[in-house]
Image (cartoon, coloured by chain):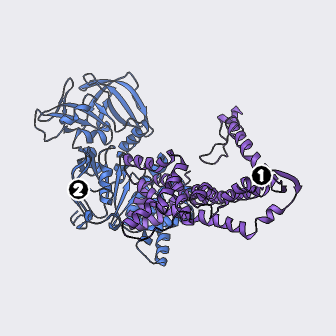
Amino acid sequence: MTTAPLLRVDGIRAVYGDTVALHGISLDIAHNEFFALLGPSGCGKTTLLRSIAGFETPAEGRIEVDGEDLLRMPAHKRPVNMMFQSYALFPHMSVEKNVAYGLESDGVGRAEIRSRVAEVMDVVGLGALAKRRPGQLSGGQRQRVALARAIVKRPKLLLLDEPLSALDRQVRSSMQLELKRLQHEVGLTFVVVTHDQEEAMSMADRIAVLRDGRLEQLATPQELYANPASRFVASFIGTANLLDGTATATGVEVPGFGVVDAAHALRAGSPATAVVRPEDVELSTDAATGLSGTVVDTYFLGGASTISIEVPGITAPILATVHGASRVARGDAVGVRFARAAAVARGAGAASVTGDAAATASADPATADAAQEEVSA
Amino acid sequence: MTETLQRPAPAARAGRVRLGLAPAPFLAPGMIYLIVFMAVPVGLLAFYTFFERGRFGGIVFEFTLDNWVKLFEPLYLGVILQSIALAGIVTLLALLIGYPMAYAIAGLSPKWRTVALVAVVLPFWTNFLIRTYAWILLLNNAGWVNQWLQGLGITDAPISMLYTPQAIVVGLLYMYLPLMVLPLYASLQQLDPSLREAATNLGATPWRAFRTVTFPLSLPGALTGCIFVFVPAMSNFVIPELIGGGKTIMIGNLVRDQFFEARDWPFGATLALLLTIFLVLVIVVQSAVSRRLTEGPRRG
């Protein structure tokens, strides 16, 4: 990050009719970085991506690539390639023709086109399918074609719009690894838009979390997880026990529960939420150490188990993660201790989500346990 | 039969479910109607072509091939070729005018799109004879067009426009242009906009994106439109009669004249059958080409 950034987004504001899609987003992306724009649908991440590609014109702000003003360039002249969510493969052209399209548009010589297409098809493992039409390919294969088509021009910046959302779970996790490998191999800068926090966490060097058109936090995955900047980030990234209360000098005072120790810079007396990750919840069987609760349920997930504990004074159960199978059973009384907690300010905007002490990134059990696997990894 | 309904055959191709005989009750009414009112008359027509004409119309059942031989007389061959040429010109003009129109309509906002589509089909709500008479009022020597041309000082004397082959082309084009615009619009409108964005993103100028992506993918719609225009244009006999003045006869007039004026039913039947066979062949070729064009977009 010592050199000048590759992409500089400065104060981008985008408006559709009377709704504001982006409220002045600013961020820098470094050369060779794998960057993720993460947020729920409607947060403005796709609008930002499309503004960079030139399919949307922001109302205000500046976008620069290597110091060049992108917004002054028509879309077809920008040194940026994009992989579309729907892949947008040309159905009337063979795989080979699809991949060659960008080079042909630039008037590259025929011999060079042939060698570069062959090379990139090898990189994504598509050599044998060159003559097929997109309609004859599987979802995973189409995704590779879309990727090959987007990287064959060696763009300064590769934009990926929900690159994995159309794939089923198994293909998705292998493609995650592959995208990461590819990024190292070809040495491009990737900007990926996703609503899937697991995807962003496993692939990206840095993540910008967007919410309602505002940048909520920009940090490495580790930092986002350990030190979320807001209650929203804490609940969106991974699984967290969120305990709403008031900031004190040493932590967060949770009504009916006590003080949760957490280092923070919040003003004492301001509304705050203690964030406790499930793996930071320590359980003891003697139930004598401070807090105690009752086991409501246990979920065995293979490498780890999640235990849900009802603690008096807190409405939603506390989630704890332990290695291997659970040694406690439903109905057991257990002691609960928080090894580590973070504290975040609870703004007026967070009012709608207060009341639930535990929030997971997704209600979908499949995603929830995927998040859990990552927690234990 | 119920079993076939519940369980799609595993061999069925993607997107297609084989239902065996199950659809029969749904197909039957339409099929019976088509067979009775299409296959039977065409069969009868084919039968008539091999017999002598009666003196006052009708058929005399004496076998002959004269009717088929007569087709190759220069007079009739000329009319047939002229019909193909006129219908071809009309189709080409309809494509050239209709494509930009359909393209523009597909690019409008949903509200204005509806307005434009209603405007396109509006003429169909008026009787076509009335609309054809309107053209006579426009095109005749004392008609509006000539009045304007002279009023604006572009010409001194009226130009005779009515009762020319050009007038027939104008009339047919006017009549069938909506049939070109609608299928073209449908195929352009359902094109995924991200395809054009992808082309642009890969460095294609707007013109190249149109030429290499939008246009080829709209070809099936264009072909459908061409058939929709060519088939009725080729067999139309009212417009050549009214606007063409009966001088430039098309095959439709010829068929009509054979039955009602010349009272030569067998030869009229031969001409009608020839027209039918020709148009069926055109449609078969069109659907084969169209299938080849759309082979790609099939999604698994």
- Asked which secondary structure carries label 1, the reply is helix
Q: Which is nearer the eye, A114 or A55?
A: A55
Name the image quarter holding residue A255.
Answer: top left
Name the image quarter holding residue A94.
Answer: bottom right
Q: Amino acid at mark 2?
A: Leu
Give me the disc on residue A27: 2
| Whether residue A123 is visible | no
Give me the disc on residue B137: none
Residue placed under numbered mark 1 in the picture = B45
Q: Percent x, y for residue A100?
A: 47, 69
Q: CA distance from mark 1 to mark 2?
A: 78 Å
Parent chain of label 2: A
- Extreme residue in the right direction: B62
Q: Which is nearer the eye, B283 or B141?
A: B141
Q: Is residue B121 left or right of residue A336?
A: right
Q: Percent x, y for residue B122?
A: 47, 47
Q: Percent x, y for residue B287?
A: 63, 56
Q: Colour of chain B?
A: purple
Judge the density around disc 1: few (<14), some (14-19), many (≥20) Cα neighbours within 10 Å: many
Q: Which chain is the one coloured blue?
A: A
Please determine whether, in this image, residue B288 is positioned above or below residue A170.
Answer: below
Q: Which is nearer the eye, B155 or B288?
A: B155
- Identify which residue is drawn at 33% across, 60% down: A53
